[in-house]
């Protein structure tokens, strides 16, 4: 047997023995026990201007949306394979990728090495990081997940590498970080009686370390497949060079989000370093699933990895689900059986929701209060004004999905050198009609516009 393969098998056995089983309620961090969030409403007007074309190439178009310090890159890519997607993406966002990826990796490396003991990974993996370095550990992480990955993901990363002229291994390592970290985020899916006109709406608020300055390089990517093997058209909301999905929507009226879990209870199963990384599970769902039922079936069958809460809403079936996600267990919740069952997390008809973590009383109850204050007339606008801003969630970005109309509302936090409020929930939102964007045609010549 190959010595390296034997080493991996031994590590996986050790991982199973040492698997993290969760914390008790008494061990919750102070941010979940004692913090009572209350922010000011966001009264800024929503920017509705049309995207501005920057450049076309054969398989890609680059636009900008927004004004002043609240601009976001919007990129369309077309392809017969992942490489086509990646090469167009890398070519159009060359400058942004070469600024963002090395800077972000350096920041992550520093943070990981300084806070190694607090990482939500097995002890054996921490020892590898400490003794062999982060690059070695992330390469090992890729070896553990590679059997479960869609090969077109690797092709896309190679295309970005070639188009942007950036190191392929660096790109790949950036995409392995998701399994090592936990982002504290908020989610709700609302439909029927809860919303104005019975629309299906979803809040995705992404809370993470703003010192990493992810928000300085925001990118909305719209994928247009030219081959059935690439699924259907979908949208990823991320940053320059990042192709995993933390936030996104699809042309089939699905919306995705995920919340990292630091404080599980004993209803969660084990974690594993071996499986399909959750950022690519989410991407697969947006890229290939037609309905929430397809998505839940995929989640049931896939080899899962870490503790998460996933949120999926479906504008066709007019419903939403929350998923308790771990390697060895998965549970699906609707508004009738929503968990955790606690006085600080009451059930709401036609709403599923979670705030900050699995066990996080103060934030979850505050989210409940704001949803109930708007109940029966929840809209994207009221969510922006009176829910995310008042609960103070979504510092890096806030996305509100209108899945009945396929419209995205997005705000990004301020880059470190920008003025005004830092958190996305207090900044101006941009409105993007994805029906129009999904119908855009593939360019055939290079055009530059002032």
Image (tube, rainbow, N blue to C red):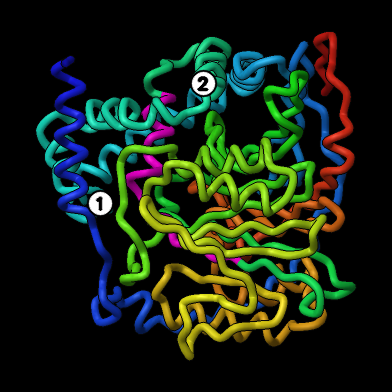
Residues 69 and 397: in front is 397
Magenta-drawn stretch contains 184: yes
Specify the quadrant that holds the N terminus.
top left
Numbered range of the magenta stretch = 171-187
Front residue of 386 and 11: 11
Residue 139 appears in the figure: yes
The residue shown at (83%, 14%) is: 447
Ranked by sequence position, the earlier of labels 2 and 1 is 1
Indicate the position of residue 366 as horizontal and vertical percent values: 54, 83
In-front residue for pair 103/243: 243
Is residue 174 within the magenta segment?
Answer: yes
Secondary structure under tag 1 reads loop
Q: How many marks?
A: 2
The label shown at residue 119 is 1
- Image position of 239 with respect to 16: above or below: above
Q: CA distance from mark 2 to mark 1?
A: 28 Å
- As drawn, 259 above or below 373: above
Residue 422 visible? The answer is no
């Amino acid at each position: 047997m190959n010595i390296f393969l034997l080493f991996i098998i031994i590590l996986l056995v050790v991982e199973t023995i040492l698997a993290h089983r969760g914390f008790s309620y008494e061990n919750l961090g102070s941010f979940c026990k004692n913090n009572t969030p209350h922010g000011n409403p966001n009264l800024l007007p929503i920017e509705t201007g049309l995207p501005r074309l920057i450049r076309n190439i054969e398989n890609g178009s680059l636009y900008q949306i927004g004004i002043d310090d609240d601009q976001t890159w919007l990129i369309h890519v077309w392809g017969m394979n992942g490489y086509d997607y990646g090469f167009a993406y890398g070519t159009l966002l060359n400058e942004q990728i070469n600024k963002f990826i090395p800077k972000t990796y350096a920041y992550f490396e520093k943070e990981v090495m300084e806070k190694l003991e607090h990482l939500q990974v097995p002890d054996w993996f921490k020892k590898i990081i400490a003794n062999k370095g982060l690059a070695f550990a992330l390469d090992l992480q890729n070896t553990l997940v590679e059997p479960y990955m869609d090969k077109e993901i690797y092709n896309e990363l190679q295309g970005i590498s070639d188009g942007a002229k950036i190191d392929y291994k660096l790109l790949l390592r950036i995409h392995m970080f998701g399994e090592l970290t936990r982002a504290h985020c908020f989610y709700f899916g609302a439909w029927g009686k809860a919303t104005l006109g019975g629309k299906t709406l979803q809040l995705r608020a992404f809370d993470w370390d703003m010192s990493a300055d992810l928000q300085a390089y925001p990118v909305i990517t719209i994928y247009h497949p030219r081959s059935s093997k690439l699924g259907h058209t979908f949208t990823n909301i991320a940053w320059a060079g990042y192709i995993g999905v933390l936030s996104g929507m699809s042309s089939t009226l699905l919306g995705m989000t995920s919340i990292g879990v630091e404080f599980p209870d004993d209803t969660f199963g084990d974690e594993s370093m071996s499986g399909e990384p959750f950022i690519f599970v989410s991407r697969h769902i947006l890229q290939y699933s037609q309905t929430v039922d397809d998505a839940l079936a995929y989640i049931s069958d896939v080899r899962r990895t870490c503790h998460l809460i996933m949120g999926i809403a479906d504008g066709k079936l007019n419903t939403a689900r929350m998923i308790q996600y771990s390697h060895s267990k998965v549970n699906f919740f609707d508004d009738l059986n929503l968990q955790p069952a606690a006085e600080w997390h009451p059930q709401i008809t036609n709403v599923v929701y979670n705030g900050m973590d699995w066990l996080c009383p103060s934030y979850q109850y505050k989210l409940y209060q704001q949803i109930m204050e708007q109940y029966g007339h929840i809209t994207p606008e009221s969510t922006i004004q009176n829910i995310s801003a008042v609960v103070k969630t979504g510092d890096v970005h806030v996305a509100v999905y209108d899945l009945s109309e396929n419209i995205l509302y997005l705000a990004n936090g301020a880059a470190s050198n920008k003025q005004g409020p830092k958190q996305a929930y207090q900044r101006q939102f941009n409105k993007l009609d994805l029906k129009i964007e999904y119908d855009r045609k593939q360019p055939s010549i290079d055009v530059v516009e002032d």
